[in-house]
Image (spheres, rainbow, N blue to C red):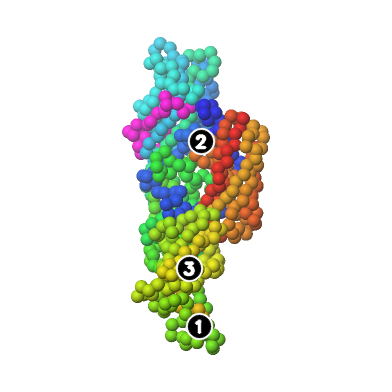
C-alpha cells in the first residue's frame, strides 16, 4: 500500500470511530491468559499520542496549545484532517527580531512529568541578512529558549529546512528528545521565531512563510508515580465468607495524574478478569503502546480522577473451595492499589432438597436411611464409599476456556474407595450458567462403562457455566455420596455479514449478523463494531442486538480509496450474558 493510500485508510478508520456511540455496558472482561489489558511494562509510565499515532492514524491534540506574539504570526492546526500543528511567521512583512514568535506547547497534566518524547517534524527557515538577523525553528525542553533547544534549524548557519513535509512519518522527520532535556520536564515547545539584535528585523521573503515548523506526530511518555486511593469498600465480595453466583464490590476511589483505569480480580494471585472502571469514557481507552505491555492513550490525562463504582464478579471463574480473592485498582499508568485481599470459600454446587419417601418430611435419603426408601443399587459394585472424578479431555485444569459452538468433552471414572469400578451407574449432571440470577438446571445424565469410566460431550450451545457431577449409590437417594465439579468459560460467538464487499466514497455498506447464545439480556446485548486498514483495530460504533441476538447497522464512506478494510463485531463481557468477550469472523471490504 502506498503512503497516500495508507494515510487515507487511517483517516477513514478514525472517521468511522468518530461517528460511533462509545457507551458500553458495565463490564469489560478479560480472562486469565486472554487479558486484553495488563500492567504496563514500566509501572508508573504511559504513552500519549498526539496528531498521529506511530502507525499513522489520526489522533487528537489534547495537551497542546498554540500562541503568537503579534500579527502575521500563525499557530495553525490541521491534525484532525490528517495534517499537522504548525508554528510560522508570515513572509510578506519584515518580522521584528526577538518579538516575533509562534509556538506550540505541550503541557504534562498535574501529577505527571515527561519521561521521554519522540516527535515527527519538518521545518523551513528562509529569512536572514548579514549580521545577527535570522529566522530559526527549535524543539525545546524544559524551557522555551535557545539554550533548551534539542533540535534546531537556523537560516544564518545555512539550514534552510529539515525533514520531508510530503511524508509525515518519514524517518528523517523523527526526533528523539535527549533525556537531559525532557526527563522530569513539564513542557515541550515547538517554536518559529526571528532572532537578532533588538530593534532590527528579519527581512520579508515576498510571501508565504519566512519560517515554519510542523509537528506531524508525537509519542510522549509521561511518568505518574502515585497509586490510586480507595475508601468505603463494601459489597458481598468484601463481607461474605462463602461466595456463589455473581458477587459485587463497591468502593469510592481517587487518583492524581493519569486517572482511574481498571479493576483486576485475582484468584490465588492469578488474574482471572479485569474491568474498565469507566467504560463509557472514550478517552480512557488503551490504544496499545509501542512496547509490549505498555499502555498508550490519545489524551494526556485520559481517565477520571475520582469515581464511585460497584463492580460485579462471577465466582464461577474460580473453582470450588477456599481461595485468596484479591481486587486491585489500577490507574492508566499501571500504579495499583489493593482494595481487597481475603480468603473466601467458593460454593457453586447446586442445592438439594432431600425428602423421605415414607414420611414426606424434608429429611435426607442416603447412607443411614432405610433400604426400602433408598431403592435399588445404582450400578454394579454400588457403594456408599465411592470416588468420582471428572476432567476435561483437553486439559488437566479444572477450568477450561472454550469457544462458542465447540463440542467440549469430559471424561471421568467412578469407583469405590477400595478401587473397584462401579459400572452401569447413572450420574447426575447439572449446570449453573454464569450470569446473575441463573438457576441450576439438569443436563442429560451419563452412565459409567465396565471399568467405571464415563464420557460426556457437552452441547455446542452451552454457555460459561459451573458444572456439577453427582453419584447417588441408590436410585431413590436424594443425597449423593460422591461429587465432582468443573468450570467452563466460553467466548461469545458472533456471525458477521457485510454487503456489498466492494464500494466507493459516499456509498454505504450494511452490517448484519447474529450473536449466538442465550439468554440475551433484557433490551438486547451491546456489540462493538471495529475496523482496521492494516494497523490496530479501532472501535467506530456501539450497537445493540434485538431480543433474539440479531443486529443490523450501516456505514457510509467519507474518504476516497483505494483501500481494503477489515471489519469485525466484538461482544464485550456483561454480567447478565453468560459468555466471555468474543469477536466475529473478519470481513473484508474494498473501497475503490
Name which residue lies at 47% across and 34% down: 55
Residue 273 location (% of width, % of height): 45, 56
Q: Secondary structure at mark 1?
A: loop
- For residue 534, the mark is 2
- For residue 468, the mark is 3
Most foreground residue, 332 or 256: 332
Name which residue lies at 57% across and 38% down: 588
Name which residue lies at 52% across and 78% down: 353
**Residue 555 visible in the current orientation:** yes
User: Which portion, as a residue range, is magenta?
Assistant: 168-189
Query: In the displayed structure, does residue 205 sit left or right of residue 40?
Result: right
The outermost residue toward the front is 450
Q: Which residue is mark 1?
A: 375
Residue 404 location (% of width, % of height): 53, 54
Q: Magenta stretch containing residue 169, yes or no?
A: yes
Residue 13 location (% of width, % of height): 56, 37
Most foreground residue, 81 or 12: 12
Amino acid at each position: 500500500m502506498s503512503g497516500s493510500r495508507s494515510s487515507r485508510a487511517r483517516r477513514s478508520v478514525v472517521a468511522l470511530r468518530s461517528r460511533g456511540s462509545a457507551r458500553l455496558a458495565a463490564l469489560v472482561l478479560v480472562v486469565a491468559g486472554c487479558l486484553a489489558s495488563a500492567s504496563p511494562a514500566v509501572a508508573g509510565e504511559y504513552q500519549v499520542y498526539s496528531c498521529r499515532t506511530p502507525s499513522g492514524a489520526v489522533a487528537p491534540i489534547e495537551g497542546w496549545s498554540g500562541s503568537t506574539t503579534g500579527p502575521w504570526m500563525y499557530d495553525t492546526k490541521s491534525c484532525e484532517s490528517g495534517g499537522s500543528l504548525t508554528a510560522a511567521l508570515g513572509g510578506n512583512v519584515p518580522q521584528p527580531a526577538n518579538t516575533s514568535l509562534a509556538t506550540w506547547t505541550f503541557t504534562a497534566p498535574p501529577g505527571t512529568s515527561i519521561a521521554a518524547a519522540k516527535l515527527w517534524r519538518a521545518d523551513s527557515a528562509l529569512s536572514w541578512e548579514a549580521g545577527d538577523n535570522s529566522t530559526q525553528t527549535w524543539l525545546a525542553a524544559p524551557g522555551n529558549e535557545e539554550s533548551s533547544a534539542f533540535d534546531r534549524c537556523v537560516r544564518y548557519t545555512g539550514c534552510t529546512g529539515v525533514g520531508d513535509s510530503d511524508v509525515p512519518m518519514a524517518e528523517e522527520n523523527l526526533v528523539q528528545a535527549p533525556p537531559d532535556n525532557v526527563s522530569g520536564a513539564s513542557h515541550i515547545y515547538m517554536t518559529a521565531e526571528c532572532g537578532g539584535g533588538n530593534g532590527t528585523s528579519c527581512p520579508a521573503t515576498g510571501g508565504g512563510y519566512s519560517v515554519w515548523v510542523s509537528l506531524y506526530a508525537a509519542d510522549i511518555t509521561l511518568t505518574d508515580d502515585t497509586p490510586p486511593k480507595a475508601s468505603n469498600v463494601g459489597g458481598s465480595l468484601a463481607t461474605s465468607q462463602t461466595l456463589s453466583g455473581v458477587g459485587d464490590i463497591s468502593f469510592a476511589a481517587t487518583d492524581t495524574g493519569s486517572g482511574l483505569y481498571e479493576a483486576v480480580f485475582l484468584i490465588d494471585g492469578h488474574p482471572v478478569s479485569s474491568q474498565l472502571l469507566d467504560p463509557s469514557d472514550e478517552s480512557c481507552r488503551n490504544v496499545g503502546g509501542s512496547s509490549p505491555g505498555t499502555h498508550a492513550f490519545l489524551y494526556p490525562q485520559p481517565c477520571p480522577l475520582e469515581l464511585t463504582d460497584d463492580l460485579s464478579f462471577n465466582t464461577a471463574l474460580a473453582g470450588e473451595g477456599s481461595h485468596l480473592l484479591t481486587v486491585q485498582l489500577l490507574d492508566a499508568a499501571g500504579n495499583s492499589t489493593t482494595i481487597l485481599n481475603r480468603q473466601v470459600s467458593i460454593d457453586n454446587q447446586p442445592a438439594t432438597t432431600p425428602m423421605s419417601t415414607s414420611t414426606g418430611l424434608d429429611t435426607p435419603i442416603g447412607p443411614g436411611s432405610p433400604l426400602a426408601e433408598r431403592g435399588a443399587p445404582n450400578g454394579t459394585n454400588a457403594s456408599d464409599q465411592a470416588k468420582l472424578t471428572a476432567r476435561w479431555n483437553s486439559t488437566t485444569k479444572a477450568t477450561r476456556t472454550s469457544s462458542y459452538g465447540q463440542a467440549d468433552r469430559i471424561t471421568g471414572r467412578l469407583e469405590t474407595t477400595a478401587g473397584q469400578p462401579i459400572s452401569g451407574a447413572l450420574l447426575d449432571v447439572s449446570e449453573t450458567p454464569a450470569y446473575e440470577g441463573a438457576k441450576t438446571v439438569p443436563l442429560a445424565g451419563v452412565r459409567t462403562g465396565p471399568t467405571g469410566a464415563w464420557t460426556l460431550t457437552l452441547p455446542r450451545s452451552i454457555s460459561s457455566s459451573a458444572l456439577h457431577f453427582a453419584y447417588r449409590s441408590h436410585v431413590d437417594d436424594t443425597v449423593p455420596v460422591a461429587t465432582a465439579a468443573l468450570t467452563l468459560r466460553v467466548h461469545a460467538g458472533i456471525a458477521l455479514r457485510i454487503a456489498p464487499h466492494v464500494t466507493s466514497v459516499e456509498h454505504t455498506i450494511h452490517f448484519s449478523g447474529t450473536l449466538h447464545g442465550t439468554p440475551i439480556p433484557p433490551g438486547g446485548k451491546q456489540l462493538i463494531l471495529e475496523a482496521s486498514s492494516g494497523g490496530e483495530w479501532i472501535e467506530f460504533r456501539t450497537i445493540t442486538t434485538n431480543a433474539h441476538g440479531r443486529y443490523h447497522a450501516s456505514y457510509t464512506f467519507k474518504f476516497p480509496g483505494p483501500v481494503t478494510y477489515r471489519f469485525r463485531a466484538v461482544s464485550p463481557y456483561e454480567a447478565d450474558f453468560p459468555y466471555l468477550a468474543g469477536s466475529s469472523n473478519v470481513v473484508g471490504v474494498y473501497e475503490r
